């Protein structure tokens, strides 16, 4: 039986949904599963790691691992992978995952595939699929090494009821040495009230159509009403109106929520490749020719300053 | 300070990509410098302007397009260009490319290696990080700002999962940059004219002092077996007219048809 090691996606002291999604996929292909959790003060998270569907839990819990640092995190994963005898090592599509996965593959001397949407293994043959060229094509890739390190695209694997529930078997990992060549001096944390874009069931994004801060505030209110993550397009980041961490697209975050509402976003290819995995897309734009309408399930052609307040009112009405 | 910047030739993603019989149709494709590598070039030229540096660019691949891309780097302000052109590298994966770049690095003893965080064609985002592992030097990926502290140290700001991570890096090191780091300059006509006259150091694997075997090219870890077209999302319905009326209609559909509200 194949052994799959999943890297726990932990943010602000919480095990993220993606961890359970990856474990569910591993179990659906009949693999033995383990999870590796890295950070500081992780004791309280262990039950969550078990219920996410892992059969053993490798835990690297150390003050020195409080802040993300790619080299020591990679050391922990290599350690866990060797102890577990992992055939495949899966990361969720996070910035830390993207930074660590190639290192782990380099150290283990195995293949690395990022942004994968599926993985199949028949006998000794592993194949993955992944989008490329800004989502315009799908690659089918044959893995020649015996093992695989993979970063899984957001929304690719679904959580299943059968996947839930594991068993507790905790293995403590020794703390690796710090990376003295790249010392994390400080973390300027994102505002704590923000809903994580990767987790949100609904994402509302703003584009250049909102013009200024007043426009942003208007759309943010809609996001707040919906309990939605709040994203943006590259143009808004470049103009300094929105932070980098809010950018949805090929170069920013890739999201796949249940509902994506694009407000005042024209729909450059770069943005589209970050959100077309969404289940339902709504676009609000005053230009009926805007490319965003080519991917939207429901397009509202109109002035966002007029439409958004109505949208908020309508949504309030149905929530009553 | 000696800076090496890696640049890759990629297909222009704005154009239509056709797929036939499991392969991308070459005809009609156009090639450009990978957008993130333009950011990498801009970052190294800015370091040269502000702190003084000797800047070198390396590109793996052949053809006239690749020459044009290197010349574009010159026109943006890069001092030296290296082209590794060897048909043996046609099927190279990230690990092979990283080994080739390692050979280039070992020849030049660079203090800082700047790469784009990923390439627009493959979207892999691996080569720079693997290069650092191979060289055994620090690496900071997804960098959105960079400042020189002194000859041996830089401060790199990385966009991480929880916010901005401020990292003090000891050189030599690899930095992979996000497109948020800068706005690449457009080469001016004069720069482009000058760039035409500049020499490009072209070498194959043998000239680089290595072989396909040594860079792992005979034992590639992964290979693309087939391309297919992504299933394009179909355009849904557009609603035009009275804002209140169409908005109500869409909200109703989201509740009763799509069942997402």
Image: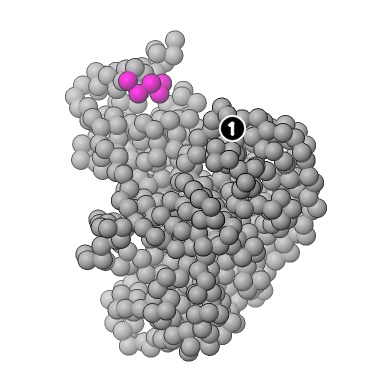
Region in magenta: B257-261
Judged left or right of residue B38, residue A3 is right
Q: Which SS type dominates the magenta stretch? A: loop
Is residue A173 in view from this perspective? Answer: yes
Q: Is residue B229 above or below residue A196?
A: below
Q: Position of residue A33 (x, y in %)?
A: 65, 42
Is residue B42 in view from this perspective? Answer: no
* Disc 1 residue crowd, few under 14, some 14–19, many 20+, Cα 10 Å: many
Q: What chain letter is assigned to the residue under label 1?
A: A
Q: Position of residue B79 (x, y in %)?
A: 45, 82
* In the foreground, B37 or A22: A22
* In the foreground, B16 or A242: B16
Task: Point out the image quarter for the C terminus of chain A.
Answer: top left
According to the picture, the residue beneath numbered tag 1 turns out to be: A163
Q: Of all residues shown, which one is farthest toward the top?
A: A320
Q: Is residue B150 above or below residue A307?
A: below
Residue B133 quadrant = bottom right
Q: Position of residue A269 (x, y in %)?
A: 32, 49
Q: Is residue B207 magenta?
A: no
């Amino acid at each position: 039986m194949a052994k799959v090691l999943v890297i726990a996606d932990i943010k602000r002291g919480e095990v993220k949904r993606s961890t359970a999604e990856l474990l569910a996929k591993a179990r659906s292909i009949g693999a033995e599963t383990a999870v590796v959790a890295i950070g500081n003060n992780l004791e309280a998270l262990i039950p969550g790691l078990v219920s996410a569907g892992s059969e053993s839990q490798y835990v690297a819990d150390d003050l020195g691992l409080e802040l993300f640092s790619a080299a020591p995190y990679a050391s922990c994963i290599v350690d866990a992978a060797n102890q577990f005898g992992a055939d495949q090592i899966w990361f969720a599509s996070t910035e830390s995952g993207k930074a660590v996965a190639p290192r782990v593959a380099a150290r283990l001397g195995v293949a690395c595939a990022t942004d994968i949407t599926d993985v199949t293994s028949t006998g000794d043959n592993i194949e993955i699929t992944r989008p490329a060229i800004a989502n315009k094509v799908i690659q089918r890739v044959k893995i020649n090494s015996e093992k695989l390190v993979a970063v899984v695209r957001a929304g690719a694997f679904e959580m299943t009821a059968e996947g839930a529930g594991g068993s507790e078997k905790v293995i403590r990992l020794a703390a690796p040495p710090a990376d003295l060549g790249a010392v994390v001096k400080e973390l300027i944390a994102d505002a704590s009230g923000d809903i994580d874009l990767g987790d949100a069931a609904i994402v509302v994004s703003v584009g250049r159509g909102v013009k200024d801060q007043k426009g942003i505030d208007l759309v943010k209110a809609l996001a707040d009403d919906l309990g939605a993550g709040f994203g943006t397009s590259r143009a808004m980041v470049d103009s300094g109106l929105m932070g980098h961490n809010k950018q949805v697209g090929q170069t920013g975050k890739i999201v796949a929520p249940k509902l994506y509402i694009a407000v005042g976003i024209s729909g450059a290819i770069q943005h589209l490749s970050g959100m077309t995995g969404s289940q339902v897309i709504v676009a609000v734009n005053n230009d009926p020719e805007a490319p965003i309408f080519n991917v939207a399930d429901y397009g509202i052609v109109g002035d966002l300053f007029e439409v958004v307040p109505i949208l908020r009112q309508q949504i309030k009405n149905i929530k009553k | 300070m000696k800076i090496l910047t890696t640049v890759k030739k990629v297909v222009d993603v704005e154009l239509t990509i056709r797929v036939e019989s499991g392969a991308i149709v070459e005809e009609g494709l156009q090639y450009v410098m990978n957008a993130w590598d333009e950011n990498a070039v801009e970052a190294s030229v800015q370091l040269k302007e502000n702190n003084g540096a000797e800047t070198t660019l390396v590109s793996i691949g052949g053809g006239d397009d690749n020459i044009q891309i290197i010349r574009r780097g010159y026109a943006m302000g890069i001092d030296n260009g290296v082209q590794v052109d060897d048909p043996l590298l046609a099927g190279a994966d990230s690990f092979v490319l990283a080994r080739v770049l390692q050979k280039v690095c070992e020849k030049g003893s660079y203090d800082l290696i700047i790469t784009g965080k990923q390439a627009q064609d493959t979207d892999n985002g691996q080569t720079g990080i693997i290069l650092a592992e191979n060289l055994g030097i620090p690496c900071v990926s997804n960098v959105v700002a960079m400042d020189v502290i002194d000859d041996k140290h830089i401060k790199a700001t990385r966009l991480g999962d929880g916010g901005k991570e401020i990292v003090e890096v000891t050189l030599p090191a690899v930095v992979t940059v996000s497109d948020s780091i800068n706005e690449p300059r457009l080469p001016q006509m004069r720069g482009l004219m000058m760039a035409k006259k500049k020499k490009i150091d072209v070498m194959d694997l043998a000239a680089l002092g290595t072989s396909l075997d040594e860079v792992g090219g005979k034992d590639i870890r992964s290979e693309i077996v087939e391309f297919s077209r992504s299933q394009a999302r179909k355009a849904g319905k557009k609603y035009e007219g009275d804002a209140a009326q169409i908005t109500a209609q869409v909200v109703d559909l989201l509740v009763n048809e799509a069942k997402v509200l």
